Image: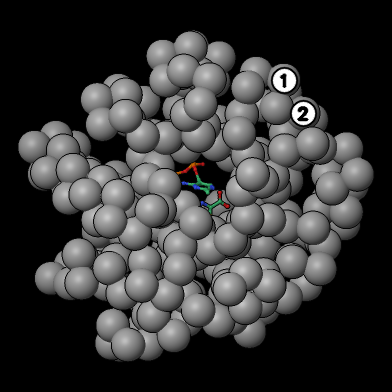
Amino acid sequence: MKLRGLYAITDSQLLAGKFLAYVEAALEGGVTLLQYRDKSSDEARRLREAEALRNLCERYKTQLIINDDAELAARLGVGVHLGQTDGPLAPVRALLGHKAIVGATCHASLALAEQAASEGATYVAFGRFFNSNTKPGAPSANLELLEQAHLKLHIPMCAIGGITLDNAAPLVAHGVDLLAVVHGLFGADSTTEVTRRARAFNELLLIK
Ligand SMILES: Cc1ncc(COP(=O)(O)OP(=O)(O)O)c(N)n1
Ligand SMILES: Cc1nc(C(=O)O)sc1CCOP(=O)(O)O
Ligand SMILES: [Mg+2]
């Protein structure tokens, strides 16, 4: 089955004190992929939180993806997301096996996306499409790129960077399968609002 839907990404600062409650609220509204993104070097906390997320994801039949850390992903038996400076993709594909989800950041480059696909990426991520609170300095991408990529690629396309319910529709209209969101989902002021937003993103993607 083709990967399509809301791709929720955690943020340790934004979710401080409400981490599992907000993640569960998102899962309740429907999440296709959940990425654990923690840029700290606190290995023990990372393992603890990732295990807690894996348990939650099992309950909601959501796929867990670990950002950056293929060894942690292998230890937990889940997927991984790699950026351009996170090491080569092919050995990670070999480590995790052919069924694992391995995503690749491709910024605004179709060439990087074609290379990632040839090395075994499950999906490619383009961005950032809008101003991002989480990663303001990320290189920017545009809708024209999506049009070209949609014609050339045979794996799901993910869009990231400043995505909200108000600006996501053109991305979907240009062939995006996965909407990757931090603030536009978890920047809500209640769990009820997180669930509502998750449901609304799924409606945009025509997913029930
Ligand atoms: C779905 C998705 N797309 C892009 C990124 C960014 O990855 P990267 O460039 O490695 O930057 P960091 O997230 O590691 O700071 C992502 N994490 N997820
Ligand atoms: C982690 C990340 N990577 C990006 C890229 O363009 O590669 S943008 C980004 C942050 C996404 O968070 P928000 O939805 O809050 O903008
Ligand atoms: Mg990375």
> Residue 179 appears in which quarter of the rendering?
bottom right
**Residue at the (20%, 65%) spot, across then down:** 19
**Residue at the (55%, 81%) spot, across then down:** 200
Task: Say whether residue 46 is left or right of residue 150.
Answer: left
Q: How is the image coloured?
A: one colour
Q: Is mark 2 within 8 Å of ligand 1?
A: no
Identify the element where label 2 is drawn.
Answer: helix
* Dot 2 alpha-carbon crowd within 10 angstroms: few under 14, some 14 to 19, many 20 or more: some
Task: Say whether residue 19 is left or right of residue 69.
Answer: left
Which residue is denoted by mark 1 in the rendering? 118
Is disc 1 in contact with disc 2, using a CB cutoff of under 8 Å? yes
Classify the position of the C terminus by image quarter: bottom right
Q: Position of residue 10 (x, y in %)?
A: 34, 58
Q: Distance between the residues labelled 1 and 2?
A: 6 Å
Q: Position of residue 87 (x, y in %)?
A: 47, 20
Which residue is denoted by mark 2 in the rendering? 114
Using the image, determine if residue 201 lies above or below residue 96.
Answer: below
Q: Which amino acid does label 2 sit on?
A: Glu
Classify the position of the N terminus by image quarter: top right
Q: Which amino acid does label 1 sit on?
A: Ser
Task: Say whether residue 13 is left or right of residue 161.
Answer: left
Q: Position of residue 74 (x, y in %)?
A: 32, 24
Task: Report if residue 42 is visible in the image.
Answer: no
> Residue 79 appears in which quarter of the rendering?
top left
Identify the element where label 1 is drawn.
Answer: helix
Q: Position of residue 8 (x, y in %)?
A: 44, 61
